[in-house]
Image (cartoon, rainbow, N blue to C red):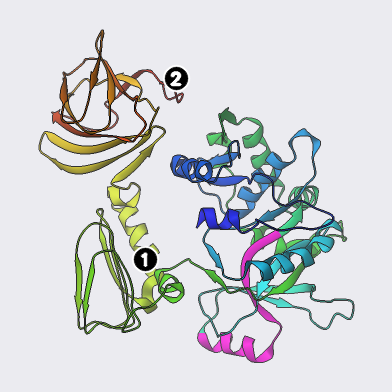
Amino acid sequence: MLQATIRRMTGFKHTKVDLAPNPIIVCNEGHRLLVAEQIMAMGYQGAPIILEPVGRNTAPALTVAVLQAMRNDQDPLLLAMPADHQVEDVAAFHLCLAMGVEPALCGNIVTFGVVPDRPETGYGYIQANQLDPHAEQIYPIIRFSEKPDRETAERYLAQGGYYWNSGMFLVQASTWLKAMDQLQPEIFSCCKIAFDRSIRESDFLRLDKETFSSCPADSIDYAVMERLNFLSDTFIQGVVTPMKVGWSDVGSWDTVWKINRKTAGNNSVSGDVMLNSTYNSLVLSTSRLVSCVGVDGLVIVETPDAVLVAQKKNAQKVKEIVMALKSDGRKEGHAHRKVYRPWGWYDSLEHGDRFQVKRIVVNPGAILSLQLHHQRSEHWIIVKGTAKITLGDQIVTRNENESIFVPVGEKHRVQNVGNIPLEIIEVQSGAYLGEDDIVRLEDRYGRVAQ
C-alpha cells in the first residue's frame, strides 16, 4: 500500500506545478528498513525517509516533512497522503488534485472530501459551505465532525454538503509553516528544533529523540484546519473539493473485506484456507492451514505471531487488544517474530530453555556487523547461497549443506558474496539469548555503540 500510494502520482500533470519528484516519507523508526526496501524496489534511490522516535500524530509529521521540503530555500507545493488508502480511479483522483492546485497556490489549505455513498460511522466528516456563490467545486469548510453514530450519519447524507474526511491535504510549504507558527507555536518549535538537531544516515533522517518526544501530539484537523479562523493572516482558508474516486481508508479488517475480491459465500480469503458453510467472512492465513465451519461475518487473521478472531462489525476494536498487549508488557505488542535488519531479516522459528532457532536471510552483497556474544554460542547451517565468514582471525567460505560453530565470546560476521539471498539456520545455545547480548565491533550501517 505504501508503493501504491507513491505510484498514485504517476502521470499527474499540471501547467503550474510538478508533484512527481522523489517522495518524502515520514515513518516510525522501527519501520525504517521495511520502508527503505519498498522505496528502493520502486527505484526511488535517495528519497528522504524521516524517522520519528515516537508517534506524535499527523500535524508534527507534516511539519517535519515541510521543513525537509524547504531545504535549499525552496517553497514547493506538497500533497500529504496517508499510506493506508485505496484509490480505484487514479485518473479521477488526478482531476480532483488539479482542481486544488490553484487554491493551494493562492495560500489556502486544500483537503479532499470523499462523496459518501452510505451512512458510514467509521469515518469523520467535513461539512462544506456549498452556498458560497464564488465556489466552484472548491468550498469553504464549515466544520469537521468526528465519527458519528448511525442516526447522525444518515442525517448528514439526507442534508447534503457533508463529505468523508480523506485525511489528504494540498498546501504550499510556506503556508503550512505560517499556520503552524501562529496556531501551534509549541508544536512548530519542537518540530523545528528536532529537525535542526537531526542526524542524517544515508537516506534516513533521525529526528532528535528528546525534543520530538516532548512535542504535543495532534492531528492536522485539530491542530490547524479547525482553527484557521483564529489566524491573524485571514488569507489562509481551509477549503474542500469533493472527490469520487473509489476511495477507501483501509484502517480496519472490515474494510479489507469490503475492498477485496470475494469468493463463493461472499468470503475474502488468502493463503491456505478451507471453508465449509462459511459466509461474509475475511480469512487470511500466512503460515498454516485455517479451516472454518459454520461461521458468518467473522474476521480471522493467522500469522506466526498470533491469531485474531473477531466479528466484522467489531473489527475496529482490535486497537483495544493492542493497548492491552502493551499494558501487559507482552512482546506481541511491540515486536513481530520476523525482524528486518539493514542486511535482510531474521525469523525466530523456535525457542525454549537455553536454546533458540532462527532463519536468517542476508541480501546479496550485504554483510552483518562484526560482533561477539558474552552468553551464547551459535551453530550456523547454510541452506542456500554462499557465505563468507569471519571467525576470530580466520576468514572461511561455507556453501549450501555446510556449517560452522561460533563459540561464546568469539568475534564473527557473515557476508553474502553470492547473487542470490543467503539463507542460514542459526541455533543459539546459552544461559541468555536476548538481542542485547550483541557487542558490535564494526558495522557498515552505523550501529556500533556510541
Residue 214 sits above or below residue 113 on the image: above
Q: In which quarter of the view is residue 319 placed?
A: bottom left
Determine the residue located farthest toward the left in the rendered image: 353
Checking the image for residue 116, the label placed there is none
Q: State the count of labels.
A: 2
Looking at the picture, tell me which residue is in the foreground, 251 or 413. 413
Q: Helix or strand or loop: what does disc 2 sit on?
A: loop
Q: Residue at x 35, y 48 (%)?
A: 334
Q: In which quarter of the view is residue 439 placed?
A: top left
Residue 191 sits above or below residue 134 on the image: above
Tag 2: Cα neighbours inside 10 Å, few (<14), some, or many (≥20)? Answer: few
Q: Which residue is mark 2?
A: 450
Residue 324 sits above or below residue 70 on the image: below
Q: Is residue 162 magenta?
A: yes
Q: What is the span of residues highlighted in magenta in the rendered image?
A: 150-169
Q: Residue at x 73, y 50 (%)?
A: 180
Left or right? Give the position of 102 relative to 434: right
Left or right? Give the position of 429 relative to 49: left
Res 329 visible: no
Residue 113, horizontal then vertical, whole percent: 67, 72
| Nearer-N-terminus badge (1/2) | 1
Q: Helix or strand or loop: what does disc 1 sit on?
A: helix
Residue 139, horizontal then vertical, whole percent: 79, 74
Looking at the picture, tell me which residue is in the foreground, 367 or 382. 382
Q: Residue at x 66, y 32 (%)?
A: 196
Hey, what amino acid is under mark 2? Gln
**Picture quarter with the C terminus:** top left
Q: Which residue is mark 1?
A: 318
Q: In which quarter of the view is residue 276 placed?
A: bottom left
Res 436 visible: yes
Hey, what amino acid is under mark 1? Val
Q: Residue at x 79, y 58 (%)?
A: 14
